[in-house]
Amino acid sequence: MFGNLGKKFADDIATQVQQKLGEHLSNKARETGSTEQATESLGQVTGRRKALFIGINYYGQNGELRGCINDVHNIKNFLSKNYRIDEVLVLTDDQTSNPRKMPTRQNILAAFRWLRNGAKSGDSLIFHYSGHGGSVKDTDGDEEDGMDETLIPVDYKQAGHIVDDEVHDVLVRGLPKGVRLTSIMDCCHSESILDLPYIYTVNGDLQIIETSKNEGIATLVGAGT
């Protein structure tokens, strides 16, 4: 589906992100005396690769989608053909015979824990989500626009959304130094769904944002190419 063009695009993004983050950390070190450094070249994986794929078509529900499960199969096939992947977990709402493989709220959060479990320096974690995304009112003051972004599980009517704070806390926070997490989010309101301190925009800019979630402060400290 993507072939060599997809690989080149991914490599170009990785190179630019690595360069921008390196520049930001160097500038920060000069200003503050910090010794913080980038932990690892983005193009180097010396450990395991684990991948989590989630696709939700919301069969029989309002807002039913048609292509999300196909997206999962296409991305999974592309990555498997071009990269070594040691462990794979797929949640899609056509796996009705296996309740543990349905993309419910509980199963998605359990899958996040599976993805990061045992991760150590040199490992690469891949997370692909295709489905609905949403937004709800921010309740802890950490969003500049006053809204939290959300993932919408197949059982959202009963179990609710998964807000970005929870995605960050379960999937991202506390990952060991040297672990690389690559996330591909194919949903609405996905720009800051991981609550990361930087945003890579479609025009090629890397915006690096220093955040304090406790105080709800966000300051743009770097952008542009």
Image (cartoon, rainbow, N blue to C red):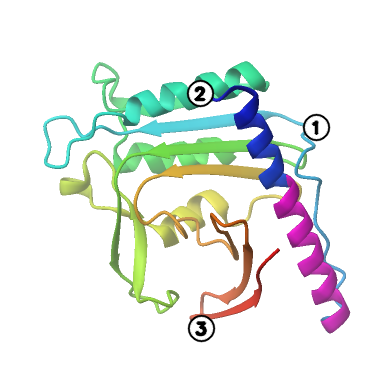
In the rendered structure, which amino acid carries the disc numbered 1?
Thr
The image quadrant that residue 65 belongs to is top left
Give the Cα separation between the discs numbered 1 and 2: 21 Å
Numbered circle sitting on residue 46: 1
Q: Secondary structure at mark 3?
A: loop
Residue at the image position 45 percent from the left and 36 percent from the top: 111
Residue 8: x and y in percent read 68, 33
Residue 104 lies in magenta, yes or no? Answer: no
The chief SS type of the magenta part is helix
Location of mark 2 (residue): 76
> Going by the image, does 17 lie left or right of 60?
right
Q: Quadrant of the C terminus?
A: bottom right
Query: Dot 2, crowdedness within 10 Å: few (<14), some or many (≥20)?
Result: some
* Image point (57%, 36%), residue name: 126
Q: Measured from the top left, where is residue 133 in percent x and y? A: 32, 50
Closer to the eye: label 3 or 2: 2
Give the magenta part as a residue range: 15-31
Q: Which residue is mark 3?
A: 215
Q: Residue at point 38% right, 76% down? A: 145
Which residue: 23% across, 20% down? Answer: 96
Nearest to N terminus: mark 3 or mark 2:
2
Amino acid at circle 2:
Lys
Three-letter residue code for mark 3: Glu
- Residue 118 appears in view: no
